[in-house]
Amino acid sequence: MNRENLLQFFKQLKPLQRVVIQAHDFPDHDAISSAYGLSFILQSLGMKTLIVYNGEIDRISLSNMVEWLNIPVVHCSKANLNANDHIITVDGCIGENNVTDLPGDEIAVIDHHTVTAPNSLWFADIRPNYGATATIIFEYYQMLKIDMPMKVATALLVGLNIDTANLTRGFCNADLKAFITFNQIADLDIVNKICRNSLIHYELTNFEDTCKLVKQSEGIATVLLKEPCAKNMLGVLADFLLSVNEFDVVIVAIENKGALQLSLRSECPKVNVGHLLRKTLNDTRMGFGGGHSHMAGGIVLADNTQHFMEHDNAHFAPFVKEIKALRSLEAAF
Ligand SMILES: [Mn+2]
């Protein structure tokens, strides 16, 4: 991606009545902050923008961020989108299971997941080696020499911190450069207050549940939660389990309307959990999944959960089998 491509794309957007920026469903901090950062760029170029999402904002830290920084986000059900709208997807990709197909024409994807965008788009900027979409947005500011407002830097820094677990996973040099600039401009008291307050009282139950129910075999920790749990809480619990020294691959799941919602983490270099989910779910049509090498999410469709659990006993056999195969494959060298 160079300055010319970017300017060409913005030129194409210019005549539109409004530009819709869509975060992935059940958005996270990186998705909302990147949408916010992009909307400021487009507005400063004279365009009207609308940030939308589907699903829920289910982390207290994200609703605090939206409230404290006054980020104008709208649930898609209240956005009155129509067939004339043009949509840029950020931190997610059209065609993926976590990006709802909304009314309007999808014209662009800006993402850091391992995804393939359709050829028909006006613009695609996909950088799977980046720790956060926030860093891609940072580079747009640099390329266009736009001053980044404090609120935008504050949001983007939260997105970068949370996606990379405070620069401890899946980041590259570009993320470090973005971090330095964000850090100079952002309101660090607000960044830290958002990041520190990541739970609500009830969610302590989810930790209790996790501690009681976790099982492990050869470093693979698995949990099927019993109590209700916010979708994005699964990742928080998976990170928590990965902090246990003996575990290097983690699977956290909860049943949701007969389907199994999943969050995976890996610190084992031989086990890429993004690939693992695509191979065991997408390729077999048992469900959908994807993400990064070290963190991924997915869903086992209701008709197929019997391959992963028996009554209340979740064995996750297809995943465990594949993880063990990956581990032994590399060991042969
Ligand atoms: Mn992200």
Image (cartoon, helix red, strand yellow):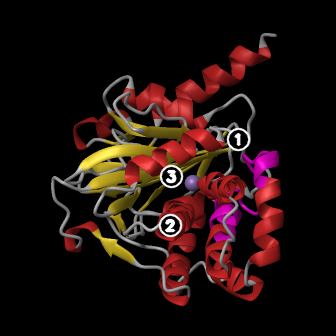
Q: Secondary structure under badge 1?
A: loop
From the image, tell me which residue sits under label 2: 233
The quarter in which the N terminus is drawn is top right
Q: Earlier in the sequence, mark 3 or mark 2?
A: 3
**Residue found 35% across the figure and 64% down from its top:** 53
Looking at the rendered image, the disc whose residue lies closer to the viewer, 3 or 1, is 3
From the image, tell me which residue sits under label 1: 219
Could you tell me how far apart the alpha carbons at marks 3 and 2 are, in whole angstroms?
18 Å
Provide the residue span drawn in magenta. 157-175
Residue 212 occupies quadrant: bottom right
Q: Which mark is residue 234?
A: none
Instruction: Inspect the image, locate mark 1, and give the three-letter code of the amino acid beneath it.
Output: Gly
Picture coordinates of residue 17 (x, y %)? Answer: 28, 63
Picture coordinates of residue 280 (x, y %)? Answer: 44, 28
Query: Is residue 298 among what the camera can see?
Result: no
Picture coordinates of residue 70 (x, y %)? Answer: 49, 86
**Residue found 48% across the figure and 63% down from its top:** 42
